[in-house]
Image (spheres, rainbow, N blue to C red):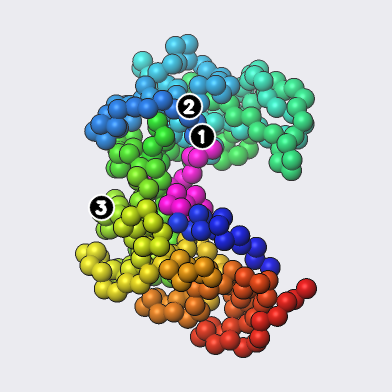
């Protein structure tokens, strides 16, 4: 049974930093959260006006504590590249007239961690390079179910042209741009490290939709506790003004709007692309991932604190019409009906049209 504690889910529903959105789009949504760390405040104007990564490279130091193996004697100027790369990417860099390959080597093992790269073997075959890494290890107990992971920065000199890289028989892809994380903010760069979006956002994600196959590529950006929408070329679609956002079609969105710090005054609005409010109602939207998981296709989970002491969660359609009143501890779709729990630990069944089809009773 779905276990929702109202106070916790209320926070989750109105939280704007939604970490569970889809990742791994080709242009710029590969997750770098595992590489984040606390940083000192920085001049926001510097981040906003940066034209390329090179303008802020000195700020990109979050991986300085990681093991490094380098065939470049004075390599400090190359370290920032590792803040860009994911685990299966490499980048070619010409530094002081010498060509280098930079990439991560990730060692995973139960009971062991790496301490130092002892040696590297490079085997060229045409324009393919195979790399074997000999890592010095020590015993270290694993934490829980997952193996220990050791990340090693690798800077290798290229003796000849390379278009295909395999590290310990794992294929790597050449870097083609993506998300940049610096000073707690995120931006997007192209393959030449020029900014497509400046690093001023708290989050950049693909915008989830009810109909994935019919939706153009859109991005949800998060800044200053608000969400907005950008198109595939990072042009504004919706201003950064809203809570949770649902895409219906190219000219219709459902959004949460907060007018003050009192959740009782939040509204859910149906808006067009020009951000005109076409219809609105009291309440706030739960995350689209919740609705896709807990609701019948195309229906939306929501809450409305204005219902008073017995308020809770309900279901509405895409025209903001109520299907199930927002009175319940939990509602979720299973086996062709809604299973609804009230605040007395009683359960009843409702149809997709909101008709109650059984009496509330305790199931245990």
Query: What is the distance, in whole Å, between disc 2 and disc 1 at their CAs?
Result: 7 Å
Choose the circle earlier in sequence order: 2 or 1: 1
Q: Which residue is mark 2?
A: 62
Residue that protrudes farthest toward the top in the picture: 73
Q: Is residue 135 above or below residue 185?
A: above
Is residue 144 highlighted in magenta?
A: no
Residue appearing at x 30%, y 39% in the figure: 198
Q: Residues within 10 Å of mark 1 (few under 14, many from 20)?
A: few
Question: Contact (CB < 8 A) between labels 2 and 1?
Answer: yes
Residue appearing at x 32%, y 39% in the figure: 200
Q: Secondary structure at mark 2?
A: loop
Choose the circle earlier in sequence order: 3 or 2: 2
Q: Nearer the viewer, residue 51 or 298?
A: 298
Q: Which mark is residue 235?
A: 3
Residue appearing at x 33%, y 68% in the figure: 269
Q: Main secondary structure of the magenta part?
A: loop
Residue appearing at x 51%, y 85% in the figure: 353
Q: Residues within 10 Å of mark 2 (few under 14, many from 20)?
A: some
């Amino acid at each position: 049974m779905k276990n929702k504690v109202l106070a916790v889910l209320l926070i989750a529903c109105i939280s704007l930093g939604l970490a569970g959105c889809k990742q791994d789009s080709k242009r710029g949504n590969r997750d770098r959260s595992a590489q984040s760390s606390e940083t000192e405040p920085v001049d926001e104007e510097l981040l906003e006006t940066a034209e390329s990564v090179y303008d802020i490279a000195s700020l990109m130091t979050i991986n300085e504590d990681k093991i490094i193996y380098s065939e470049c004697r004075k390599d400090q100027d190359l370290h920032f590249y590792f803040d860009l790369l994911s685990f299966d990417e490499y980048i070619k860099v010409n530094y002081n007239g010498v060509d280098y390959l930079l990439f991560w080597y990730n060692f995973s093992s139960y009971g062991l961690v790496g301490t130092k790269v002892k040696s590297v073997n490079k085997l060229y075959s045409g324009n393919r390079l195979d790399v074997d890494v000999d890592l010095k290890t020590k015993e270290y107990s694993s934490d829980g179910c997952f193996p220990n992971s050791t990340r090693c920065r690798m800077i290798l000199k290229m003796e000849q042209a390379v278009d295909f890289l395999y590290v310990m028989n794992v294929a790597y892809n050449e870097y083609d741009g993506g998300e940049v994380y610096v000073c707690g903010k995120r931006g997007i760069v192209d393959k030449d490290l020029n900014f497509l979006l400046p690093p001023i956002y708290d989050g950049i994600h693909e915008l989830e939709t009810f109909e994935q196959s019919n939706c153009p590529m859109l991005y949800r950006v998060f800044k200053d506790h608000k969400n907005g929408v950008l198109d595939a070329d990072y042009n504004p679609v919706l201003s950064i003004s809203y809570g949770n956002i649902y895409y219906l079609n190219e000219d219709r969105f459902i959004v949460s709007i907060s007018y003050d710090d009192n959740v009782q005054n939040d509204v859910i609005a149906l808006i067009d692309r020009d951000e005109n409010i076409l219809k609105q109602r009291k309440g706030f939207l739960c995350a689209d991932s919740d609705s896709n998981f807990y609701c019948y296709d195309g229906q939306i989970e929501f809450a409305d604190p204005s219902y008073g002491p017995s308020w809770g969660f309900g279901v509405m359609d895409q025209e903001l019409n109520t299907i199930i009143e927002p009175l319940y501890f939990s509602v979720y779709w299973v086996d062709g009906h809604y299973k609804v729990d009230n605040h007395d630990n009683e359960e009843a069944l409702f149809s997709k049209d909101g008709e109650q089809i059984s009496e509330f009773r305790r199931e245990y």
